[in-house]
């Protein structure tokens, strides 16, 4: 699943929602400047599309995963395991599969991965 970030680098632009201090942690300057607070400071339609495409190529997967986890059911369940072991009883996950795949592919991926994720999470 992480391959989608390399195959479709535009997906990495979700990192724009993160604050500048987090970008700095990865040695990058936020395109919104060093004081950018992320989503609250961005006006998406004012961003230059060509600059966005170039920025996407430089964004590391690790920065993206500061905001969102990517992976199959097993990978996501493994990321949730430490929380379950620490006593968490409830989690709320937001799925963004539809932002990276065509509608038909989204339904295929969700149809196989979501039931499996439910099984794995219930077993934690």
Image: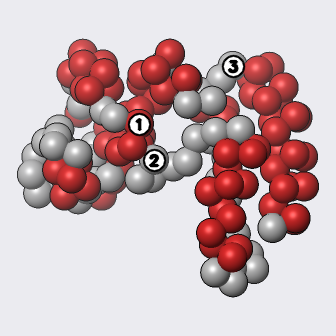
Mark 3 and 2 residues: CB-CB less than 8 Å, in contact? no
Q: Is 105 above or below relative to 67?
A: above
The label nearer to you, 1 versus 3, is 1
Q: Residues within 10 Å of mark 1 (few under 14, many from 20)?
A: some
Circle 3 crowding by C-alpha within 10 Å: few under 14, some 14–19, many from 20? few
For image coordinates 71% across by 38% down, the residue present is 72
Give the labeled residue for mark 3: 102
Q: Where is residue 81 in the image (x, y as percent from the top left)?
A: 68, 65
Rendered location of residue 14, percent (x, y): 41, 40
Which x, y percent locates residue 52? 27, 25
**C-alpha span from label 2 to label 1:** 6 Å
Q: In which quarter of the image is residue 41?
A: bottom left
Q: Tell which residue pokes out farthest to the left in this image.
A: 34
Mark 1 falls on what kind of element? Answer: helix
Quarter occupied by the N terminus: top right
Q: Give the residue pinned by disc 2.
A: 65
Residue lying at 76% horizontally and 44% vertically, measured from the top left: 73
Direction from residue 98 to residue 6 in the image, left or right: left
Could you tell me which residue is drawn at 58 percent across and 41 percent down?
Answer: 70
- When the figure is inspected, residue 51 is found, relative to residue 47, above or below; the finding is above
Q: Can residue 49 be seen in this view?
A: no
Q: Report which quarter residue 44 is drawn in.
A: top left
Quote the CA–CA distance across marks 3 and 2: 22 Å
The residue tagged 1 is: 61
């Amino acid at each position: 699943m992480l391959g989608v970030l390399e195959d479709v680098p535009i997906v990495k632009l979700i990192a724009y929602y993160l604050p500048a201090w987090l970008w700095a942690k990865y040695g990058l300057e936020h395109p919104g400047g060093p004081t950018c607070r992320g989503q609250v400071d961005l006006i998406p339609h004012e961003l230059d599309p060509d600059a966005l495409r170039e920025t996407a190529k430089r964004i590391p997967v690790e920065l993206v995963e500061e905001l969102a986890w990517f992976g199959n059911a097993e990978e996501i369940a493994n990321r949730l395991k430490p929380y379950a072991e620490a006593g968490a009883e409830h989690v709320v996950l937001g799925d963004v599969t539809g932002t990276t795949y065509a509608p038909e592919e989204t339904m295929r991926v969700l149809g196989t991965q979501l039931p499996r994720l439910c099984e794995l999470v219930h077993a934690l």
